[in-house]
Image (cartoon, rainbow, N blue to C red):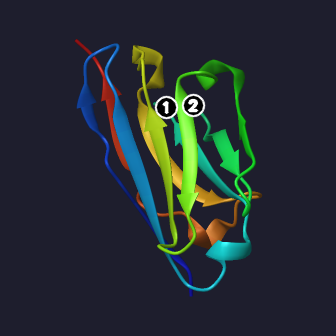
Amino acid sequence: QVQLVESGGGLVQPGGSLRLSCAASGSIFGRSVMGWYRQAPDNERVLVATITPIGNTNYVDSVKGRFTISRDNAKNTVYLQMNSLKPEDTAVYYCNTRPSLPDYWGQGTQVTVSS
């Protein structure tokens, strides 16, 4: 059974940075495309960034140049470095495979960008 545990969220001022981590248990990590998703209040969950097993990345336009997704296959961990944060980045952030699998959603980690 796969379990994904997100961490690293918090309260940060506009322009600040955070680094999120997602630790995966189970054997699927190394061969899976992984993604970071986010869900803002009263909004649907949306995909933010993806990374293939060999490190190819893709981002939605709203975070390009500010966010960086990376992974450490030896540690079964995927990261999201978030710089130049804006209030509109406020959301609960989740990791999952891409495409996402319903049973893999974790609790997420809250990111709040506010002065």
Residue drawn 56% across the image and 88% down it: 1
Query: In terms of secondary structure, where does tag 2 sit?
Result: loop
Which amino acid, by three-letter code, is at mark 2? Asn
The answer to whether 16 is drawn above or below residue 115 in the figure is below
- The residue sitting at 42% across, 25% down in the picture is 83
How many badges with numbers are in the image? 2
Q: Which residue is mark 1?
A: 40
On the image, the x and y values in percent for residue 74 come to 52, 75
Which residue is denoted by mark 2 in the rendering?
Answer: 43
Asked whether the residues under the numbered discs 1 and 2 touch, taking CB atoms below 8 Å apart as contact, a structural biologist would say yes
Residue at 41% across, 59% down: 107
Q: Relative to 24, is 21 on the left or the right?
A: left
Q: Is residue 3 above or below residue 49?
A: below
Mark 1 residue type = Ala
| Mark 1 vs mark 2, CA separation in Å | 5 Å
Residue 55 seen: yes
- Crowding at dot 2, Cα within 10 Å, few <14 / some 14-19 / many 20+, comes out as few
Label 1 crowd (10 A; few <14 / some 14-19 / many >=20) = some
Depth check, front residue: 70 or 97: 70
Q: Quadrant of residue 102?
A: bottom right
Specify whether residue 108 is in view.
no
State the quadrant of the C terminus. top left
Q: Residue at x 34, y 28 (%)?
A: 17
**Vertical placement of residue 108 versus 47, above or below:** below
Q: Nearer the viewer, residue 73 or 101?
A: 73
Residue 94, position as x, y percentages in the image: 50, 51
